[in-house]
Amino acid sequence: MEENLFEQRTDLTQLQESVNQLKAEIGKVIVGQEQMIELLLAGILADGHILIEGVPGVAKTLTAKLLSKTISVGFSRIQFTPDMMPSDVIGTTIFNPGQGSFQFKPGPVFSNIVLIDEINRAPAKTQSALFEVMEERQITVDGQSFRLGAPFMVVATQNPIEQEGTYHLPEAQLDRFLFKINVGYPTLEEEFKIVSHHNSSNLQNMMAEVNPVLSAELIASLRSQVRALHVEEKLIHFITTAVTTTRNHKSIYLGASPRASIGILNASKAIAAMHGRDFVIPDDIIYVVPAVLRHRLELTPEKEMEGATTDQIINEIIQSIEIPR
């Protein structure tokens, strides 16, 4: 009888196999970057958008393109520039002389996985075009609403050190990203492997070897499994305590919204499922908290002048809360 208490309530075999296959396919081209790949896959399972930040040349865009190759769904890429207009993203209404009426011509955002390269290069007017589609998975043009097919996921990249020709993303838009993934430089060993790979084969040949693993139907099935995972009440209390602490912390000017709490819940479920568990443990929550919160918090000017980072403050907050066991 006691053994039954610990039996898996949900069979996660297919989910784990799919995750391992995805990692293997991406690993044909990408060396290292385990956390970025893990969080990207968690983002798919949790139905969230992802912002990837890193200096040029650390495979941000390449990884996003690889992700689209491993999933048999539509893919589009939008290169954001300072002169880009909202209609360049969502589409525009044009006159059809043959029918004598106006028709909506969908823009590149009408796809399943949308890669937005250098998202912080477009002004606020263009960024606002993404607000509705990222939250509601629909576009409203001239009073008409157009729903996007599932799955729909925005993967955006930005460069943290570029200042010229860039714009600060609006807080309302940042809040719509489930994760912000910081990508650093590879280690010496990883860089040796990267250069060795390119010495023996070119990028086009490596990309050609990447095969699709997931379909839209399978993603929908895996997501419903993730949503069904069990989370104890004490863990939900742990999540909400961490998020509400950001709103009255002396080092934080702007705290996280309830959307962040829901994001941590969904992301920790995805991580648990990826590790073969149908229940969430505190370590799952602690793992995803920095990626969910770091782009949602704004430090006070004094803390910024001291050189403090949001990740340091997030770590302080987690350490100050009693972790449920």
Image: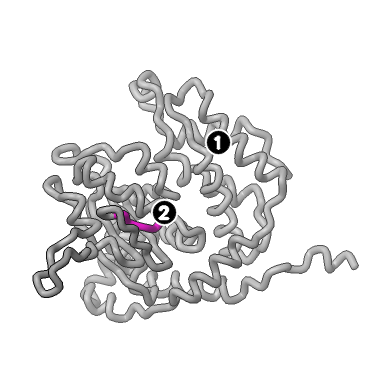
Question: Dots 2 and 1: beta carbons under 8 Å?
Answer: no
Q: Residues within 10 Å of mark 1 (few under 14, many from 20)?
A: many
Q: Can residue 63 be seen by looking at this rendering?
A: no
Q: How far across and how far down the image is residue 17, in percent?
A: 54, 75
- Identified at 58% across, 49% down, the residue is 265
Rendered position, 160 above or below 204: above
Amino acid on which disc 1 is placed? Val
- Identified at 52% across, 24% down, the residue is 249
Considering the numbered disc 2 on the image, is that residue within a helix, a strand or a loop? helix
Q: How far across and how far down the image is residue 160, in percent?
A: 27, 42
Q: Can residue 240 be seen by looking at this rendering?
A: yes
Q: Nearer the viewer, residue 152 or 87?
A: 87
Amino acid on which disc 2 is placed? Glu
Q: Residues within 10 Å of mark 2 (few under 14, many from 20)?
A: few
Asked which quadrant contains residue 26, the reply is bottom left
**In this rendering, would 109 be left or right of 214?**
left
Q: In this figure, which residue is indicated by the disc labeled 1?
A: 243
**In this rendering, would 40 be left or right of 167?**
right
Number of marks = 2
Considering the numbered disc 1 on the image, is that residue within a helix, a strand or a loop? helix
Point out the tag, 2 or 1, that comes first from the N-terminus: 2
Distance from disc 2 to disc 1, alpha carbons, whole Å, reads: 23 Å
Question: What secondary structure is the stretch in magenta mostly built from?
Answer: strand
Asked which quadrant contains residue 95, the reply is bottom left
Q: In this figure, which residue is indicated by the disc labeled 2?
A: 136
Q: Which residues are magenta?
A: 136-140
Give the quarter of the figure containing the N terminus: bottom right
- Identified at 57% across, 45% down, the residue is 286
Q: How far across and how far down the image is residue 232, in percent?
A: 71, 50
